[in-house]
Amino acid sequence: MANDHSADIVVVGTGVVGCLIAQQAVDAGLSVLMLEAGPRVDRWRIVENFRNLPPSLRLFHWNAPYPPKPWAPHLETRTASEQEQYLQLEGPNARAYLQGYVRYAGGATWHWAGICWRLTPEDMRLRSLYGVGRDWPFGHEIIEPYYTRAEYAIGVSGPSDPMLQWPTNGKRSKPYPMGPIPFGPGEHRFTEAAAKLGMINLPAPQARNSGVSYDGRPACCGNNNCFPVCPIAAKYDAATALPKIEAKGGKILANAVVYRIETDEKNSIQAVHFFDPDKRSHRVTGRLFVIACNGIETPKLLLLSKDERNPNGVANSSDQVGRNMMDQPKLTAELELQEPLWTGVGPVQSSSILNTTQGDFRGRHAGAMFRMENFARSPLGAAAALKKGLVGKALDAEIRRLSACTARLTVEHEILPSANNRLTLSSQKDWLGINKPNIHYDVGDYVRRSAEEYTVPRLRRLAAELGATKFQLSPEFLNSDHIMGGCIMGTEPATVVVDTDCRAHDHPNLFLPGGGAMPSATASNSTLTMTALALKAADAIVNQLKHG
Amino acid sequence: MSDSYPDDCPTAFSLTRRRDVLVGGLLFGAIAALPTLPAVAAPALWSDEAAARFMEISSLLVPHRLKAEIGSRMGAAMMALNPALLQQIDGLLSIARAKNARVVEDFFADVPDGPLKDTALAIISAWYLGVVTGAPDAEVFAYEYALMYGPTRDVMTIPSYAISGPNRWTADAPPLSNMPEF
Amino acid sequence: MSNPSPHLGALLIIFAATALAGNCRAADPPHQAAAEIKRGEYLAIAADCAACHTAPRAKPFAGGLPIGTPLGTIYSTNITPSTDFGIGRYTEEEFSQALRRGIRRDGANLYPAMPYTSYAKFTEEDVRALYLYFTRAVEPVEQRPPSTSLPFPMNIRASMIAWNLLFLDSGPFVPDRNQSPEWNRGAYLVQGAAHCGTCHTPRGLLMQEEDSRALSGAQVGPWYAPNITPDPISGIGRWTKEELIAYLHTGHLSGKAQAAGSMGEAVEDSFQHLAAADLDAIATYIKTIPVVRDPADRVSRFSAGKMSSALAQLRGRDGIRSDSESDPGGAELFQGNCASCHSTEGQGSKDGYYPSLFSNSATGARNATNLIATILYGVNRTTSERQAFMPGFGGHPTDANPLSDRNIAALGNYVLTHYGSADTIITEQQVAEVRWGGPSSPLLALARGGMAAAAVIVLLGAALFIIRRRGAAAWRAKRTAPCT
């Protein structure tokens, strides 16, 4: 087999985690090769794809502007049958693991909301404090400097007033690099209503440029399209990092689908193998390998790579690869209100309630984050008004009313890691003959109790406070697209997959950084923590190769 | 399944049943009523004259600025789905003329339920949504010029377009009764 | 200004120190010296010394800014009062010679990257104020910038003598008694400190500024400094004086023009800080300079184009786009790359932050250089009012959304057809040229080719003028890459 490429560091995946590690590595003078399964697509094409979508697909079908290549399938949801094509889901809450990541260069940050919450110190000590879940192998003071570096690396805007920062009790070594993004009318009113219930709606720290340019990217101008695509790259996405990596000598190979990790006699990683779009196989050697393919593709690749030394798959002597799959099980409520709320001004998400994620109740049920969605509701208002058969001025008035006087509230629950929430290889194969991922998912009683006793009653009170005349709750838990677990972190090699630097316990030159390593999920968006872990891993990687 | 529940999934999600349900139809009730076949190329009988009649009835049904180029494309696509379109337009035009109508309110009450009213509503829907079918691969004739964004254009942007310069939007909102011009 | 010669001994240091002390004129009351220093600081801003002598994120006036030129890299010098690395040893007279005659302390000629032909207009008093400011108020930076070493024959600094003989005006500014003091102040600033002609005045065969066509427009690296004479068609004759003042103060004039490239920087570093009376004086003077009309211009570049779009035909035709389709049209490139900020029909944002693309100097000019350069390099101009930022689309290697020469030509032609000078056509080659740094001059090739000695000398001077202009623009373009 041809040995086609080689580099000091081979990074599989070009999402935020892979790109940040690549940037640290090229800055340290190491050679880097990045392999991306999907294509590399110009932003303007994705923007135009979005605008050419029929209205029924412009909202909620976030992958629709990203048609997958046959060799790099990902979730598509235009029809129910299409939705079942790639991810094979089972279990009581299969629907809640319908993860819409993107197999394009730049990864899922193409359509993330850009929200950058930090964990609280308590979030990292669930077992010690509440007797549930797992503790992190290190404390908040270890991750804090990486949070700060992550905020500067991707450009996070956030409030300077400590009363509006999260966590309220965590040290913060530097202010946010940019000030907060202003609220629109809906967020303003929602904040007031929530406050009456003791729920504190905080301006979200967000990787979106506020008022000024940052790192060559322009400031947000309220395009209200953070997902499915920021048309101007005011929101950080990893696609914006690709030219910066190349400018420093890093190499990026798109349409390279890694399907096997090869070990040597000492069980170090020796190479990875990828298929090109012509189904030809290539071998890539390196000194160190980073698998940064997000929480589903990374365990899938490890399981695919089993060999005689690693009969359960690479990095899997603990049998924990693919277990502990997590996300934040989500419920939504559609409201119709007496008075206008006017969501849709500014970014699609710009604030959240987090004080509801913390408390001694975590011994019994999950904490949860509440949010009002801030997307423009005019298309929904128009569709609903047209359905009523209205015409002329009455039609316009009803569109305006339904756009202003409706809202969606969301609550995202903290889930506990469970060995039974497990990714395995499906017997179904994709276009290249690679097994599709199969995931069994049950949100568990911890989450169900929270919905019953804690979150749904609060949603109803929030709705009442907003003057809701209709309240329609989603009938089951939904995905939040925050994939965590699968390659969980810890100090005991028998029970976890990676060490505190996201290095595989089984292989000294294999790193599995990102959300997969997180031993607790908490109720808030995971990307900043993934990013902090990536920077921590990058330090270890550079140190290992330079002095190692 | 509740067809009014707007979410990214059918509410009674099941992995093995529910094939070929159009998610779009669930979301956008209005277009769910429309044919779900994708529009095919304009048939030969679509002409400038037909386009003119389509624009004439459109301007009576929809009290806003309409682009003739878009109307011509949408009309052709609608006729491909509904061969009786031109006759129905003539029927609508004669009702409107009988009432000396200048706006839709002047004659719409006189339009009988059935094909004529369905066609009138379909034409209105097309101008507001920019599509003539609810199919997931429907051809989009208008996004920026789709009228659905008009009634809120003083507050919200058309998604993906700037609302203002950086951070210049505010928490102030105008009264519901201030209908913008569009 | 140059690095001091290493051959100078301690004696000379003492000598210089004495001269400096002499210049302090112990008799001056302290407040008078303070006022002169303050004036010197102001003049240094008006002359935009920092533009070249302060490198990004480096200490003020420490030099070391690399100015990439086709002949090699020129590094700006340290003009802080460091005795070893800066101008600490310069007497006022030596300072004046360097500033106004392009002759440094050791007698060698400066490359005309230093605009001494304009600074020659400085009055004695203002030279003194500048001298006091640079020697007393600027922090010395003990750091030697990289030295400039151009290849032969460009390394013969003496070659500038001949060119200076031909084209360097000798005297300082002489007021015109028939004009108002305000007009004279404006003329002094425009011709001297602000050195507007350096960019806006076209060059003759030997790259001298052509006085007969003063301020009628010229190429500056990848940008074009347009006609700013008061001609109503080719120039800015339809601007009111207030508009011109507002433009200089903010770099932005709705429905007319926005400052980018070197002019964006001039607004940012210099004009926005000038006193209202001085901006008024500059505008007063500019409104009276002789008009220059390009007969090929039919309409003012500020009035071309109109609100429109191709969306009625564009939408839905292709549906989902492939990443491999190599030759997209201008309309889709425009909608996908530009319209998100400049709005669906090119009208800009409602609040005017994003300018309209019609009635806009960059699109309305028959010369499309500024449109191409704006697409490639973007805009990054910060005034006290706000930052005006547009990302580049591939002019910097780190740009997030790079476009090819072919794409930019298609996009640019769409913009010209709909919003600007509809008869102008952009070719892929033109885009490549602007990406490289601007059109090249045949003079450069001649100078390099080796000719009769006299010609070499003259042409060398000419060539160096080109590099100063292109070089400055090139680094300015580069400076827009890193920000915040």
Image (cartoon, coloured by chain):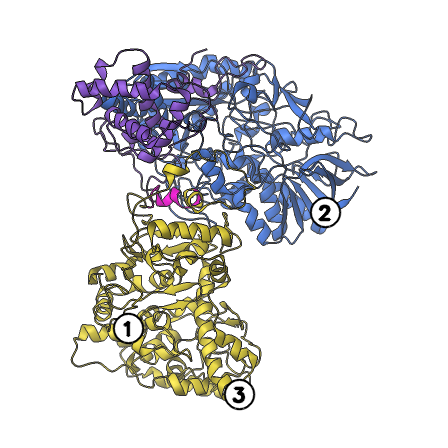
Give the extent of the magenta segment.
C336-346
Tell me the distance, in whole angstroms, between the alpha carbons under discs 2 and 1: 60 Å
Is A484 drawn above or below residue C127 in the view shown?
Answer: above
Residue at 29%, 80% (x, y): give it: C125
Neighbours of disc 2 within 10 Å: few (<14), some (14-19), many (20+): some
Is B81 drawn above or below residue A187 in the view shown?
Answer: above
In this image, C206 relative to C243: left or right?
right
In the rendered image, is residue C145 in sight?
A: no
Q: Pointer 1 indicates a residue of which chain?
A: C
Is A31 drawn above or below residue A338 in the view shown?
Answer: below
Mark 2 element type: strand
The circle on residue B72 is: none
Q: Amino acid at mark 1?
A: Leu
Q: Amino acid at mark 2?
A: His
The circle on residue C452 is: 3
Colour-to-chain, yellow: C
Colour assigned to chain A in the rendering is blue
Specify whether disc 2 shares its chain with disc 3.
no
Residue nearer the viewer, C255 or A517: C255
